[in-house]
Amino acid sequence: ITCCFQFDVMTQLHQTINRAWNSSSIWEAAVECFRIKNYCAGRVAEYELYYSFLAEHYPERINVEVLKKSDVMLASAICDAKEMQCCRDQNVLLKGCHDHRINEYKENKSLTGDICCLETQGT
C-alpha cells in the first residue's frame, strides 16, 4: 500500500481513534481493543487497521503492489543513518524499526533483526 501514511489520512485516522478510544496512539488503542476479548478477538496488526481505514474512507487512494521479501524489513533493531542509507542503496521499500527490537539489541548485540549493512551487524 503506498498511500496509508499520507498526512491527511493519518490525521483523520488519529482523530477517529481519539474519539473512539480516547487515545491518539494507534498502538494504545489496538492494545486496549485486544483487551476487550469479544470486540477484537482476532490477530490484527496496526497495518491492517491502516488498510481497513483507508479502504473505508479513501478507496481511490489504494494501490496494492506485490512486494518481494527483499523489499521489506519489518523486524529491525539497527536503524541509524548508516543502516538506513544501506537500505536505500539496496532499494528496500519499508524498514520497520521497533522500540522493543532496539531495546533487546541494546542488551544483546547479536539480536540485530533485519539488517542491510552487514558491517554494522553486532556493533
Image: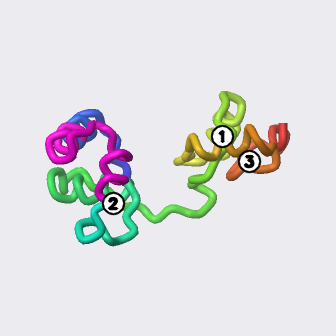
Q: CA distance from mark 2 to mark 1?
A: 25 Å
Would you name the residue on which mark 2 appears?
A: 35
Q: Which residue lies under the disc numbered 3?
A: 112
Residue at label 1?
103
Q: How is the image coloured?
A: rainbow
Q: Measured from the top left, where is residue 70 in percent x and y?
A: 63, 58
**Residue 20 part of the magenta-drawn span:** yes
Q: Of callouts 3 and 2, which one flags the residue occurring earlier in the amino acid sequence?
A: 2
Mark nearest the camera among 3 and 2 is 2
Q: How many marks?
A: 3
Separation of residues labelled 3 and 2 (CA atoms): 30 Å
What's the residue at 37%, 64% (across, down)?
44
Q: Give the side of residue 26 with respect to residue 95, left or right.
A: left
Magenta-drawn stretch contains 27:
yes
Is disc 2 placed on a helix, strand or loop? helix
Name the amino acid, label 1: Asn
Q: Inspect the image, locate mark 3, and give the three-letter code of the amino acid beneath it.
A: Thr
Give the crowd class for mark 2: few <14, some 14-19, many >=20 residues within 10 Å. Answer: few
Q: Position of residue 33 (x, y in %)?
A: 29, 57
Nearer the viewer's eye, disc 2 or disc 1?
Answer: 2
Q: In the figure, 45 relative to 24: above or below?
A: below
The residue positioned 51% from the left and 62% from the top of the image is 67
Please state the extent of the stretch shown in magenta in the rendering: 14-33
Measured in 3D between alpha carbons, the distance from the residue under mark 3 to the one under mark 1, in whole angstroms, is 10 Å
Q: Amino acid at mark 2?
A: Arg
N-terminal-most mark, 3 or 1: 1
Residue drawn where x is 65% and y is 40% of the image? 102
- Left or right of 84? Residue 42 is left
Q: What is the quadrant of residue 51 in the picture?
A: bottom left
Image location of residue 118, percent across then percent down: 82, 45
The mark found on residue 90 in the picture is none
Looking at the image, residue 1 lies above or below residue 19 = below
